[in-house]
Image: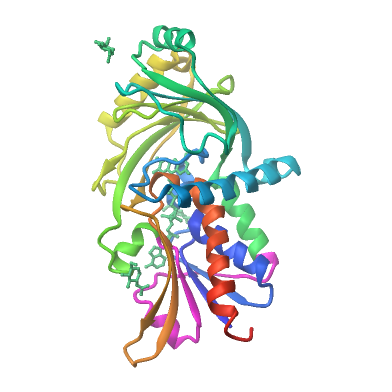
Amino acid sequence: MKVAVVGAGVIGVTTAVMIKRTFPHLSVTIFGEVFTPNTTGDGSAGLWGPYILGDTPSEDVLRWAGGTHRWLEELWRSGLAPEAGICLVPVYRVTSDSKGYPKPIWSSLVYGCHELSPELLKKINIEQKSNYSGGWHFLTYTVEPTLLLPWLLKEFKTRGGIVIKRKIKSFEEFKMEGYDIIINCSGLGARILAQDTEVHPIRGQVCRVDASWQFEVHLSDDDNGNYIIPNMNSVVLGGTHQAGDYNLQVSQEDSNFILKGCYRMSPALQKSRILKEWVGLRPGRMQVCLKLEILRSKNGENYLVIHNYGHGGSGVTLSWGCAQDVVKILKKKIFAKSKL
Ligand SMILES: Cc1cc2nc3c(=O)[nH]c(=O)nc-3n(C[C@H](O)[C@H](O)[C@H](O)COP(=O)(O)OP(=O)(O)OC[C@H]3O[C@@H](n4cnc5c(N)ncnc54)[C@H](O)[C@@H]3O)c2cc1C
Ligand SMILES: *[C@@H]1O[C@H](CO)[C@@H](O)[C@H](O)[C@H]1NC(C)=O
Ligand SMILES: *[C@@H]1O[C@H](CO)[C@@H](O)[C@H](O)[C@H]1NC(C)=O
Ligand SMILES: CC(=O)N[C@H]1CO[C@H](CO)[C@@H](O)[C@@H]1O
């Protein structure tokens, strides 16, 4: 059996590793046009947290995000954090919404999640010149895709996985090359490749600075909110989320918004050095698409596709949990009926 994984972003790579680990004798090949350090995840801070997921059902979000959280915990605890780029960080997640911030559905997945007291909220509002109506404090992980992806690709290759840099024009190519199963992890590329016009770009611009003293995450869920997310060797300041915008150039207007907002939240950041500005296009969708589909090729043969795309602002957060579901589909629906 030959499996083709389309996509070398955080979704494709985690899925491919998971398949190779579970079914060591399968031939698994990753096809990608873009590889790390140039994928959508590479510019992100990789903070764990459901964000911009349309109306993806809560039980799916919890299962996928929970699977990833437990995986990060395992890696962190077993001392693999430096290679895989994982940090355990304290997070303040706040809102200015007049309804306040109801208890997040994912609160039991993170560590020590508790609501900010009115006193603390008041202090933060004075310090940050803000008007937050509610928020939560907890600990969770960041996992930097620029470190995670090379580390996972190395494991994939060590286990005999094949990696090919190539643009796929049509899924029919795979049938011709003798692949039995295609896993569709093409992110925004699914718009063209899978003719799914529901997938659309949600542009995000961020700025990386050198601020070794900044350990806390501050994240505002407001529409015009900013965020500060420390990674191992730099701190990510954000950010924008512009739906339908394909512009990959750094915009001066966005830079001003990011720096002004983050300097207001944490004035000490004015002393930090700007390392890099970056733009990425999140694969937005009303719901994450993760399902098996049997398609018919031009010459009338059936072939199997498992879709795994459209992870919006949470691709890193959902990656491992989604990969687990792809493997579940392979086990139950495909390999149960055929001899490997
Ligand atoms: C500014 C910003 C900050 C973010 N912060 C976070 C965060 O803190 N936490 C979090 O969880 N998420 C975050 N995200 C979201 C996260 O980055 C994305 O959800 C995730 O990277 C999507 O991964 P992906 O693998 O689906 O897509 P991509 O990384 O875009 O990968 C798609 C892959 O498919 C390949 N492909 C597509 N079409 C074809 C084709 N026709 N032929 C061959 N290959 C093809 C591409 O070349 C690429 O390899 C952030 C995003 C942005 C922009
Ligand atoms: C990433 O992009 C840069 C700039 O376009 C390019 O030089 C580099 O080869 C790319 N890296 C990979 C691994 O494709
Ligand atoms: C803060 O929010 C409250 C309640 O939503 C509102 O009445 C007030 O005007 C806001 N203050 C500022 C400074 O924006
Ligand atoms: C060939 C292929 O995989 N196409 C499918 C990708 O996903 C979308 C959305 O589910 C389908 O409509 C395509 O047929």
Instruction: Indicate the position of residue 30 as horizontal and vertical percent values.
Output: 52, 68
Q: Nearer the viewer, residue 184 or 110?
A: 110
300 relative to 113, above or below: below
At x 35%, y 54%, the residue is: 287
Q: Residue 324: percent from the left, percent from the top?
A: 57, 60
Residue 36 visible: no
Q: Is residue 321 magenta?
A: no
Q: Quadrant of the N terminus?
A: bottom right
Q: Which residues are magenta?
A: 157-186
Residue at 45% in and 79% down: 304
Tell me if residue 183 is in the magenta stretch: yes
Specify whether 70 is left or right of 220: right
View quadrant of ligand 4: bottom left
What quarter of the picture does the C terminus occupy?
bottom right
* Res. 89 visible in picture: yes
Q: Looking at the picture, how far across and down is residue 263, in whole percent?
A: 40, 17
Give the camera-side residue of 145 and 116: 116
